[in-house]
Amino acid sequence: MPQIINRATIVGVDTIFHINRFYDTAMQIKTGHFNYFISQFGFEHSGRMVNSLYGPGLAYLMGLIVLCAGSWFHFQLITSVLVMFVAGASMYYLCRKK
Protein backbone atom coordinates (compact mmCIF):
# COMPACT_ATOMS: atom_id res chain seq x y z
CA MET A 1 0.00 0.00 0.00
CA PRO A 2 2.77 2.57 0.70
CA GLN A 3 4.07 2.14 -2.85
CA ILE A 4 0.67 2.89 -4.33
CA ILE A 5 -0.08 5.85 -2.05
CA ASN A 6 3.31 7.52 -2.57
CA ARG A 7 3.70 6.33 -6.18
CA ALA A 8 7.33 5.59 -5.46
CA THR A 9 9.67 2.72 -4.75
CA ILE A 10 10.42 2.23 -1.07
CA VAL A 11 14.15 2.29 -0.31
CA GLY A 12 15.37 0.91 3.00
CA VAL A 13 18.72 0.06 4.49
CA ASP A 14 19.44 -3.08 2.42
CA THR A 15 17.43 -2.16 -0.67
CA ILE A 16 20.36 -1.14 -2.87
CA PHE A 17 22.23 -4.34 -1.94
CA HIS A 18 19.31 -6.57 -2.91
CA ILE A 19 18.48 -4.53 -6.02
CA ASN A 20 22.05 -5.14 -7.19
CA ARG A 21 21.66 -8.87 -6.52
CA PHE A 22 18.39 -9.13 -8.39
CA TYR A 23 19.58 -6.90 -11.24
CA ASP A 24 22.65 -9.09 -11.66
CA THR A 25 20.60 -12.28 -11.90
CA ALA A 26 18.07 -10.60 -14.21
CA MET A 27 20.85 -9.59 -16.60
CA GLN A 28 22.36 -13.08 -16.40
CA ILE A 29 19.00 -14.54 -17.42
CA LYS A 30 18.54 -11.92 -20.16
CA THR A 31 22.00 -12.34 -21.70
CA GLY A 32 22.46 -16.04 -21.01
CA HIS A 33 25.86 -15.48 -19.37
CA PHE A 34 25.33 -17.35 -16.12
CA ASN A 35 27.88 -17.25 -13.34
CA TYR A 36 26.84 -18.66 -10.01
CA PHE A 37 29.76 -17.24 -8.03
CA ILE A 38 30.57 -13.69 -9.13
CA SER A 39 28.50 -10.65 -10.02
CA GLN A 40 28.92 -9.77 -13.66
CA PHE A 41 26.45 -6.91 -13.98
CA GLY A 42 25.63 -5.57 -10.49
CA PHE A 43 27.87 -4.01 -7.86
CA GLU A 44 29.69 -1.89 -10.49
CA HIS A 45 31.02 -5.04 -12.21
CA SER A 46 33.27 -5.70 -9.21
CA GLY A 47 32.95 -9.49 -9.33
CA ARG A 48 31.70 -9.85 -5.77
CA MET A 49 30.61 -13.25 -4.52
CA VAL A 50 27.16 -12.34 -3.26
CA ASN A 51 24.49 -14.62 -4.69
CA SER A 52 26.40 -17.77 -3.81
CA LEU A 53 26.26 -16.71 -0.16
CA TYR A 54 22.78 -15.16 -0.01
CA GLY A 55 20.71 -17.84 -1.70
CA PRO A 56 21.00 -18.09 -5.47
CA GLY A 57 17.65 -19.83 -5.96
CA LEU A 58 15.62 -16.95 -4.61
CA ALA A 59 17.88 -14.44 -6.38
CA TYR A 60 17.23 -16.07 -9.76
CA LEU A 61 13.49 -16.19 -9.06
CA MET A 62 13.55 -12.50 -8.18
CA GLY A 63 15.66 -11.76 -11.26
CA LEU A 64 12.99 -13.43 -13.39
CA ILE A 65 10.32 -11.31 -11.71
CA VAL A 66 12.43 -8.18 -12.37
CA LEU A 67 12.55 -9.04 -16.07
CA CYS A 68 8.81 -9.64 -16.21
CA ALA A 69 7.90 -6.57 -14.14
CA GLY A 70 9.81 -4.02 -16.22
CA SER A 71 10.42 -1.52 -13.40
CA TRP A 72 11.41 -1.56 -9.76
CA PHE A 73 8.06 -0.04 -8.78
CA HIS A 74 6.16 -2.89 -10.43
CA PHE A 75 8.64 -5.38 -8.99
CA GLN A 76 7.89 -4.16 -5.47
CA LEU A 77 4.14 -4.34 -6.06
CA ILE A 78 4.34 -7.89 -7.44
CA THR A 79 6.62 -9.18 -4.69
CA SER A 80 4.54 -7.48 -1.99
CA VAL A 81 1.40 -9.21 -3.24
CA LEU A 82 3.22 -12.55 -3.54
CA VAL A 83 4.65 -12.33 -0.02
CA MET A 84 1.26 -11.40 1.46
CA PHE A 85 -0.43 -14.23 -0.42
CA VAL A 86 2.12 -16.83 0.69
CA ALA A 87 1.97 -15.55 4.28
CA GLY A 88 -1.82 -15.61 4.31
CA ALA A 89 -2.08 -19.04 2.70
CA SER A 90 0.48 -20.57 5.02
CA MET A 91 -1.16 -18.99 8.08
CA TYR A 92 -4.54 -20.32 6.96
CA TYR A 93 -3.03 -23.78 6.49
CA LEU A 94 -1.31 -23.70 9.88
CA CYS A 95 -4.47 -22.52 11.67
CA ARG A 96 -6.54 -25.31 10.12
CA LYS A 97 -3.96 -27.96 11.07
CA LYS A 98 -4.79 -29.79 14.30
Image (cartoon, rainbow, N blue to C red):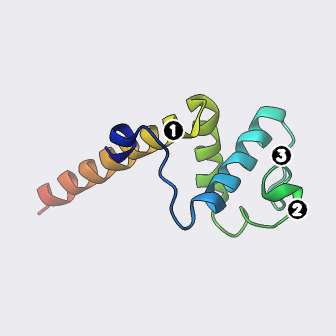
Q: Secondary structure beneath disc 1?
A: helix
Q: Residue 57 sits in which quadrant?
A: bottom right
Given residues 46 and 60, the one toward you in this image is: 46
Looking at the picture, does residue 58 appear above or below residue 28?
below
The location of residue 54, given as percent across then percent down, is 64, 67
**Residue 42: % across, % down:** 78, 53
Q: Type of residue at label 1?
A: Phe
Q: Nearer the viewer, mark 3 or mark 2?
A: 2
* Disc 3: which residue: 34
Tag in front: 3 or 1: 1
For the point 30% across and 53% down, the residue is 87
Could you say whether the residue bearing mark 3 is in a helix, strand or loop? Answer: loop
* Earlier sequence position, callout 3 versus callout 1: 3
Identify the residue position indicated by label 2 in the image: 47
Whole-Å distance between the Cαs marked 3 and 2? 13 Å
Most distant residue in the front direction: 6
Q: Secondary structure at mark 2?
A: loop
- Along the line of sight, the residue nearer the viewer: 18 or 65: 18
Q: Amino acid under label 2?
A: Gly
Query: Looking at the image, which residue is at 79% across and 42% down?
Result: 28
Place of residue 12 in the rendered image (x, y in percent of width and height, measured from the top left): 50, 62
